[in-house]
Each structure stands twice: as structure tokens, then as C-alpha cells.
Image: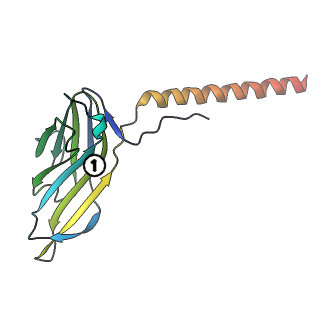
Amino acid sequence: MLALPAYSQLVLSPGQTWDYAFNSLPFRGATNAFLTTLHGEFGFTVNASSFQAGEMLGYDMFENSASEAAICTGTMTTAQPNSLICSADQAWQDFQGVVRFRMLAGSVTVDNITLRAITPSPSLSSFNVYENSFTPVPEPQLWPLVWALLLAVFCWRRVQGQRRARAITTRG
């Protein structure tokens, strides 16, 4: 049986970028309208043990597309705190947007991402909370899939050849 590597976290190396576009956020409940504002949040947690001195992780938040200007941006230069939140007023009120990581120096592991939109509600005293929290994974690379396909074709052809050889031997 062919086993391909399984990833449970996003590991970024120097020069790599990772974009995540979303077009919906699930409803999670309500929050007190007097304690917050209408806004969008891009929160994330890095594995503190993976972040070494001199490493830099850039992060960006976009309203609609990564081709437009970022509405929130920053650079993480230390593992403490290992969780950050990028926030923009009135962002993601339509429950869609894009976030990006840019590994500027070194390598780091991202453990978790939380995307949140605080939107108006019918009540004057509360806002709706839409949120998705997940463990990011790298985009699948093409070469492992190509090698798996080639291996499958090779095995299939070998089995077919053995069947043909047995059929010829039993006839003769």
C-alpha cells in the first residue's frame, strides 16, 4: 500500500507564502455590542518551539482578494506571544476574504488560524459573531501525486503482464 505523508500543521520555509481564501463563516453566537465594534479578525497561533531568534513571519488580511491592498498587515519577530490577532474595522461583513502568511526569514510552524467577523444583528445590544477556527495545511504538491500515479500504473501493468503470462502457460 502506498502511504503519502500526512500533514497536521502548516510549516513555512524561507521565501514561502501561503494564502487562504474563504467565502463563508459559520454563525457562532452573539456578543455584547457595547464591548466591541463591527470588524473582522485574523488570529493565529505559531508553535513557539519552532520560532527561533531572527525569524520573521509576515501576515496580511484582505477584504476580497490578495491582489488588492491589505486591510491589516504585520510582522511577527518573536515567539512571545505566540498568538496574534490582525483586526480591521468593518472588515469581512460579507463573510468572505483572504489571509496570507509570508515567511520573511527562517522557518516556523503555524498551529491554528481563527477567522472572525463581528456583524450587525437585529438587536441594538448585541452583534452577531461568525467564526471559523482550523489547523492550516500546506497546499498539496504535484510531484508526490505524479509519483503515486506512475507507481499505480506500473503495478497495474505488472499484474496484467503476470495474468497474460499465466493465461499463455495454461493454454500451452
Residue 53: image location, x then y, percent: 21, 29
**Eyeballing the image, is 78 above or below 157?**
below
Residue 132: image location, x then y, percent: 29, 56
Q: Residue at x 30, y 47 (%)?
A: 112
Tell how many labels.
1
Left or right: where does residue 120 sit relative to residue 135?
A: left
Q: Circle 1 — which element?
A: strand
Label 1 sits on residue: 113
Q: Residue at x 40, y 43 (%)?
A: 8
> Which residue lies most toward the right here?
172
Q: Residue at x 89, y 27 (%)?
A: 170
Quadrant of the image occupied by residue 18: top left
The one nearer the camera, 13 or 170, is: 13
Quadrant of the image occupied by residue 107: top left
Q: Residues within 10 Å of mark 1 (few under 14, many from 20)?
A: many
**Eyeballing the image, is 9 above or below 158?**
below
The one nearer the camera, 8 or 48, is: 48
